[in-house]
Image (spheres, grey):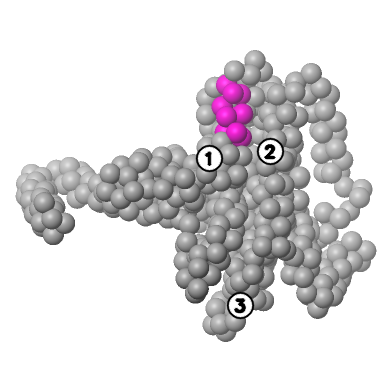
Amino acid sequence: MTNNSRHKKLIYTISIIFGFLIIAIIFFLSNNNLIAAIALFVIPFPILFVYKIFADPKIGFISVLYANYFSVGLSRYVPAPTGLAVDGLLVLTFTALIFFQFNKKVDWKNAKQSYTFFVIIWFLMTLLQLINPETLSREAWFYAMRGYALYIVLTVPLVYLIFNKPKDLDYFIILCGWFTILAVMKGIGQKFIGLDNWEKVWLNDPGNRATHILFGQLRTFSFFSDAGTYGSSMGYFGVVYIILAINEKIKQRKYFFYLIGVGALFAMIISGTRSAIAVPLVGFGAYTILSKKFKSLILVGSILFVVFFLLKYTYVAQGNYEVRRMRSAFTENNPSMNVRKENRKMFGEYLKTRPFGGGVGSAGNWGMRFTPGTFLAETATDGWYIQIWAEQGVVGLTFYLIMIFYIVFKSSFLIFFKLKNPENTSKAIAFTCGMYGLMVSSYSASSLGQMPNTIIVFVAASLISLMPKWETEELAKKT
């Protein structure tokens, strides 16, 4: 059977199905059964969506990027576990890719990369936490391990298999740009217009209110899980898009990137997240080195020094709440910092005899939900690395740090010694500098461990690792 005849047969079959659906909808409406009619009207759309993913798995991967950014915020409006949309779409995309093999050969060897091996080992280490004798709740493990390891062990191979072209990176940049604009607008709306009814309900929860209303001031959270994640994510995108703008030659795109970057940094400020200030400071600091330009070193370095000096050693703009909040991150005699130091001492004592930690899901929010009253659940981790240390011990933390340092150092190595195309180099610098910032801020916040940061960082790093191959292929075409 030819492709044309197959296509005609498919169209014919779909037409018959839709015809029966229309007849059924009319029947139920005529019998005043509105719920059944609406259900029949809605059913074809998810079926068609699944069909499109199986026809082109890249659609599924792009859907993952959407779900990764918006599903958590959507949970405030929809009484359903929308966060599981990411899991479902990742699994569905992988399944579609396996079936796609029957129509078009999939080169599975493309996924044979060092990053893939790292994330597989990390996933297996997280999986083995199920038999950790310290683990008190298998249900908590299930929820926590998704952000820990499941997302990245599925995402990284998918990048290498179906989202692996220069045009995919360009699409990724534009898509994240529009996502960031929406996040900035939502945060500004919360700050200057107010919260909607669903957000007020979420904020009325005692735990959320205690962390998002400080001294009578709202810490904006946009459609993210919390203000801390919002602030760190906006700091990351502020770094990425300002660096992209600096090196962009097309004027319209340059202005677009500047708009995104400046807006993201403003959103970071109004989030009231102190640890997020490390993202632009470290990110732009890394840029002065990775750019290999003396002018950038002097100019950007001078700006960073001035910002640091004003926040650390002066009281300029002290009347502004956001400035006071950021300045407190540089205050040595900080009650909050002292509490964190004491908590880390307690973790150190607790983990001396637990090299594999207290079990994934035993600390933080999942610990409070599933094992309340335990030491790890009741003691604030206040940092992504501290949480990994608490839950997976020194063994897990050591491997995780090796993995992320390998990723960021490999990206830096490619920038310094391998990449020749200025366009590729500027994109690699932008995302690598953003990751440096998130790595540092993760010491006192969950920057690298929260949606959407986790998936976005690993997608960007995987695409950077493909750049030498792109340049080799481009050179081969010219010769």
**Which residue occupies the foreground of this view, 26 or 303?**
303
Sequence-wise, the earlier of marks 1 and 3 is 1
Residue located at (85% from left, 31% from top): 345
Q: Give neighbour class at mark 2: few <14, some 14-19, many 20+ (Cα, 10 Å).
A: many
Q: Secondary structure at mark 3?
A: loop
Label 1 sits on residue: 153
Residue 209 on the magenta span: no
Quick check: can you spot residue 221?
Answer: no
Residue 99, compared with residue 248, is above or below; it is above
Camera-nearest residue between 159 and 448: 159
Q: Residue at x 89, y 66 (%)?
A: 309
The numbered mark at residue 400 is 2
Which residue is disc 3 drawn over?
Answer: 248
Residue 141 percent location from the top left of the image: 56, 27
Residue placed at 32% from the left, 45% from the top? 101
Q: Residues within 10 Å of mark 1 (few under 14, many from 20)?
A: many
